[in-house]
Amino acid sequence: MLAIRLLVEPERPDTLVLPVRPGPTDDAPARPATTDVALPDGVAEEAAALVPAARSTGRPGEFHAQLRPGRDPGRLLLLGIGAGDEAGWRTAGAALARAARDETRVTLAMPAGATPAAVRGLVEGLLLASYRFRLTDSGGAPALAGVDVVVADPDAYATAVEAARTTARMTRLARDLTNTPSSTKNPEWFAGQVAVAAADVDVPDLHLRVRGPEELAAEGFGGILAVGAGSASGPRLVELDWRPADARTHVVLVGKGITFDTGGISIKPVPAMKLMRKDMAGAAAVVAATLGAAALRLPVRVTTLTPLAENMLSGSAFRPGDVIRHYGGTTSETTNSDAEGRLVLADALAYAVAELKPDLLIDLATLTGANAVALGKRTGALYSENDGLAADVLAAIDAAGEAAWRMPLPADYTEYLGSELADLHSSPDRGAGSVMAALFLREFTGELRDRWLHVDMSAPSWAEGDDAELTKGATGWGVRSLLRWLGTLG
């Protein structure tokens, strides 16, 4: 990752970045922010003259570069920070990572009195926007290796920087896992990557268990087995447990882990199948968030369950119309093998309720295309009957710079889950798609129904292009939000 240093005195910078704020009123001009840094002679006056000449508004991420041949520094960069809050600095940091990609190192003078939240936003923006995933070394990697951030008291920002670094590192891990082609990424490989990542965190209270096909069959995980039956790569269930001694709250996180989704016998059209390596983004997010909680030593117990399967088309694949017996004995009829995510999640939710008995139960899943139809490409669909839990998680999502919208769980839709053959119909053709999937999952939450929250994050799990801290490809959606929320539970 990009190296970020907090300094009191800048080393002799070749490239100096100065933040620019909007004017105090709509008709007032933007202006360079006041800093605690002793700037080279003439730089402050030059920056003040450049802001109006460049027609800078100071909006977050706005950028202007000025060359200064033969002078020190040789390049002056003006960077808009908006209100100077965390969100503005996150956008500004992302813009700086891209605008300075051809530099080796830059020095940024923080405004006087900058808050730890502002520094956190800056660091997250820098580290997330500089992310790059390629399977080859060719392609012109950014030259930018480091950013020096000049502040009056580096110790005052140490905790915020560590939180930002850990959050970005875990978000990047989730992006790596999701971006990896499914020719490499099968359930066994994913479970192995979790083991490697857990060893890297290296804390004594982190425990890992992986169930293979035989254990899943012996314990009755019928949904995971059915979905994985068509693949030569057998399914897995990863159980990762961060168990600090001082934890007062136990949260179970469940993430959908379909390492590739052909749709099975209800096969997808080619355009819909192209990006199905991302169908395990929920699993990647909850694993990364749990590892982040352990790395930050958050005083909350977090158990993550990732049901992993490859939904393939073969002679052993489950069929439309099959009845599946889930963990705990509930049966479901499925007439669409492309509605497979809810089948593996149902097993994990039922297991969590019966065996783990947590205080709160959260699941993240790239569950339906209906998520994007309802809310567009950047917003997850959040479902919960618990107003307080929903409000707390939405607040954390907003603070983290992600987006979700609370959706309804209409009582009159539940009749569509009725089946003549089984306890439930998992893929009814009536009702709203994302809502029906959530209602089906709710049936497996038992006594935790009023302490359960589900996010359909199919749409925001992938970005079509670079935008602010997002880079084209997997976004790692949910890692930042979950870590923010878990940090409030200690």
Image (cartoon, helix red, strand yellow):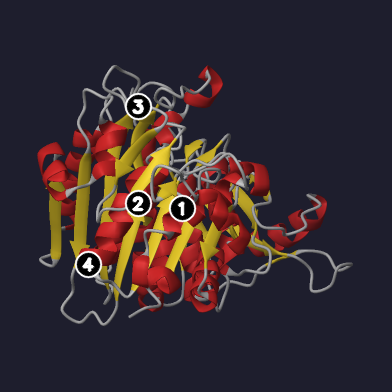
Identify which residue, 199 or 38, lies in the foreground. 199
Q: CA distance from mark 1 to mark 2?
A: 8 Å
Q: Which residue is mark 2?
A: 346
Q: CA distance from mark 1 to mark 3?
A: 30 Å
Q: CA distance from mark 2 to mark 3?
A: 26 Å
Mark number displayed over residue 356: 4
Q: Quadrant of residue 467?
A: top right
Residue projecting furthest to the right: 27
Residue 396: percent from left, percent from top: 50, 69
Q: CA distance from mark 2 to mark 4?
A: 15 Å
Could you tell whether 438 is left or right of 146 in the image? right
> For the residue labelled by badge 2, is the local secondary structure a helix, a strand or a loop?
helix
Name which residue type carries label 2: Ala
Residue at position x 64%, y 61% from top? 81
Could you tell whether 378 is left or right of 125 in the image? right
Query: Mark 3 and mark 2 in contact (Cβ < 8 Å)?
Result: no
Residue projecting furthest to the front: 420
Residue 197: percent from left, percent from top: 20, 49
Q: Nearer the viewer, mark 2 or mark 3?
A: 2
Residue 73 visible? The answer is no
Image quarter hosting the C terminus? bottom left
Q: Which residue is mark 3?
A: 181
Name which residue type carries label 4: Leu
